[in-house]
Amino acid sequence: MTQATQAGARPNVRVVLFGLMIAMMLAMLDNMIVSTALPRIVGEFGGLDHFTWVVTAYVLGTTVSTPIWGKLGDLYGRKSVFLTSVGIFLLGSALCGMAGSGMLGGPQDGMVQLIAFRAVQGLGAGGLMVGVMAIIGDLVPPRERGRYQGMIAGIMAIAMVAGPLVGGFITDHLSWRWAFYVNLPLGGVALLVLITTMHLPKYRTEHRIDWLGAGLLSVGITAIVLITTWGGNEYDWTSPQILGLAVLSVLALVAFGLVERRVPEPILPLGLFANRNFALISLIGFLLGFAMFGAMNFLPLYQQTVQGASATNSGLLLLPLMFGMLVVSLVIGRAITKTGRYRAYPIIGGVVMATGMGLLTLLDTDTSKLQSSLYMIVLGAGMGFLMQTSMLIAQNSVEQKDLGAASGAATFFRSIGGSFGISLFGAIFASRLADSAAGGAFGGEGGGMDLAKLKALPAQARELVLGGLADAISHVFLWAVLFTIAIPVLAWFIKEIPLRTANEAPTQATPEEEAEIALGKAPVA
């Protein structure tokens, strides 16, 4: 059995929260900075048909590692596990900045190296995101968590605002490589604060980490992402490669399910999904990640090509989306802490987010920046209703001893949704683009996106190319709508369970409620 021993006095929550915010900002800043810098990276290395892999590799690394980090924190203590994840993230950041620079190979190897090092970054980022949420869960009872997680959501929104601005400035005035190097001083500050101020319980356990289950899950998820990335693009859907990956994914995931039923400490405890709220919020998280990542990665592309914005200005043009998310996240977090009620928020958020995605399907070459800004405010507001509410519901559905696994599972489903979304949307974008006048405008297959070349085209040809780009991007948002409208439908079936006011079992103990929400006593600290 797992036992906890006290590692020190109760930490100063505000100081620890400051360090956690910096750590969370690392992952969020990086993703947004890179999204803004992507057109410049593709222009230098080429590979327009593979540009989504720069993001996919990061999200895939995050996805496959998240459940492992969560379970490691449950078994061996969150502090050392969390600090290790920060170190891996910083190592990946340094390597990404050196990709194709001559130190690790020439420019011809740059895109391959960058994709590989982004996967290393993602492995560390998985521990950052689940670690922050689980540590807050250790320090703060569920009733108070809404306020703190609302603050975290606000910091995430600020990072998402700062990311495009910093990324645009770096891309325009320095080098895209500094989009990765900028993580190093921030990470150093986070490590210093957390090493000196965070004192959490240390855990002793007789169980070993479920490495077999972790490996099978990684193989199954990677195979599925490769199917969505390569199917209909690199290979025909009925090709031996795609069919072989499909068989591999099925076998790996079936074997994973069998292993998880037998091991003492499963990476992803299947019993959690017997809880209706947890199962529903996991599906909602999957759909949220699916739709959200599509929007965040194609909006800068639209702004820099169709609207003609610089990298810096494209970051500024994302401010309305972040503003909507920031304001709603803070308001909803305080409202949940005050009232203890949360069921209505994912329903409202799903409707608002679907509306925002629907508005983005109207983007074309004549759409003004004011119109696109209004569309983004609606989308951001929907995201603000959902981002932290989904994590709060997941954590309130499990026992304290499973907090890391639950946080990891919730983050995992959001990340895997993002992996699938980026891969599928990238394939949809590439296919639609190939059938348009923009298909061969950037040097053909594998060519770079040379924005200067685009501006040099005759006016009529440029209009045709921009029209093709706008059509391909709006088509991505149309597909996103189809997935987003399922969120409020699923959220309608969530049961309102009172939020605990302490990290221990609630006073009510009816068999139905215990079976429904699977609450138990917190581990001794």
Image: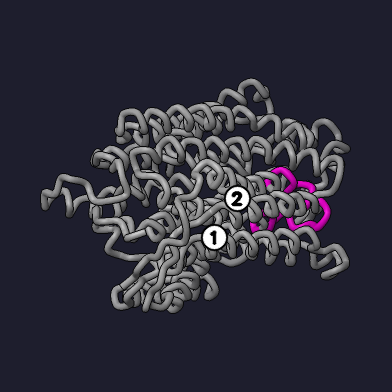
- Is residue 335 located in the magenta-colored stretch of the structure? no
Question: Is residue 332 or residue 64 the one in the foreground?
Answer: 332
- Is 339 on the left or on the right of 192, as rendered? left
Q: Is residue 436 above or below residue 158?
A: below
Kindly identify the amino acid type of the residue bearing the numbered disc 2. Ala
- Is disc 1 placed on a helix, strand or loop? helix
Quadrant for the C terminus in the image: bottom left
Kindly identify the amino acid type of the residue bearing the numbered disc 1. Phe
**Could you tell me residue 276's position as x and y percent?**
25, 51
Q: Is residue 267 above or below residue 394?
A: below
Mainly helix, strand or loop, the magenta region?
helix
Residue for badge 2? 23
Number of on-image labels: 2
Which comes sooner in the sequence, label 2 or label 1? 2
Magenta region: 35-53
Residue for badge 1? 82
- Is 449 on the left or on the right of 157, as rendered? right
- Is 439 on the left or on the right of 487, as rendered? right
**Could you tell me residue 493's position as x and y percent?**
25, 41
- Is residue 51 located in the magenta-colored stretch of the structure? yes
Q: Is residue 380 visible?
A: yes
Q: Residues within 10 Å of mark 1 (few under 14, many from 20)?
A: many
Q: Quadrant of residue 333?
A: top left
Q: Is residue 123 visible?
A: no
Q: Is residue 511 above or below residue 88?
A: above
**Residue lying at 40% horizontally and 68% vertically, measured from the top left:** 267
- Is disc 2 placed on a helix, strand or loop? helix
- Asked if disc 2 and disc 1 are in contact, CB closer than 8 Å, the reply is yes
Distance, label 2 to label 1, CA atoms, is: 10 Å
Quadrant for the N terminus in the image: bottom left
Residue 288: which disc?
Answer: none
